[in-house]
Image (spheres, rainbow, N blue to C red):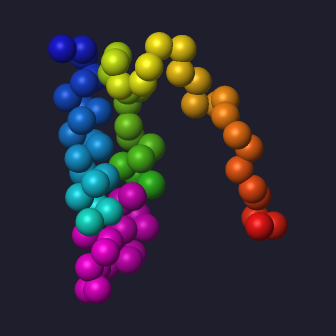
Amino acid sequence: MCEHCEDFHRTVLMLGSLALYAEHAEADQTFIEAVGPSLAASLPEPPPGIFPPGYDPNEGPEYPGPGW
C-alpha cells in the first residue's frame, strides 16, 4: 500500500461523514463551515489507481461562472 493511501481514504471518509451530518436539521453550520474546508485542504495526493492514467483534473469543459 502506498505511503498516503490510508490518510487519503480516512480523510475522504470524514468528508463523507461531514456531508451526511450537514443534512441533519440540527447540524451546527458553524462547525461544518470550519471543518469542511480544513478537511478538504488536508487531502493528500490521491493514491495511484484512483484516477485513470493520463487523467488531468484541469482539462474538461468550462463551467458557467457566477453569471449563470
User: Principal SS element in the magenta part?
Assistant: helix
Q: Is residue 66 left or right of residue 30?
A: right
Magenta span has 17? Answer: no
Magenta-drawn segment: 21-36
Residue 11 found in image quarter: top left
Q: Which residue is drawn at 36% across and 60% down?
A: 35
Locate residue 5, reporting x and y percent.
Answer: 25, 24
Q: In this view, does 8 lie above or below 64?
A: above
Locate residue 31, reporting x and y percent.
Answer: 34, 70
Q: Which residue is drawn at 39% across and 75% down?
A: 30
Locate residue 60, reporting x and y percent.
Answer: 67, 34
Q: Which residue is drawn at 70% across and 40% down?
A: 61
Residue 19 found in image quarter: bottom left
Q: As drawn, which residue projects farthest toward the right?
A: 67
Q: Which residue is drawn at 24% across and 35% down?
A: 9
Q: In this view, does 66 lie to the left or right of 12?
A: right
Quadrant of the frame with the C terminus = bottom right
Front residue (pair 60, 65): 60
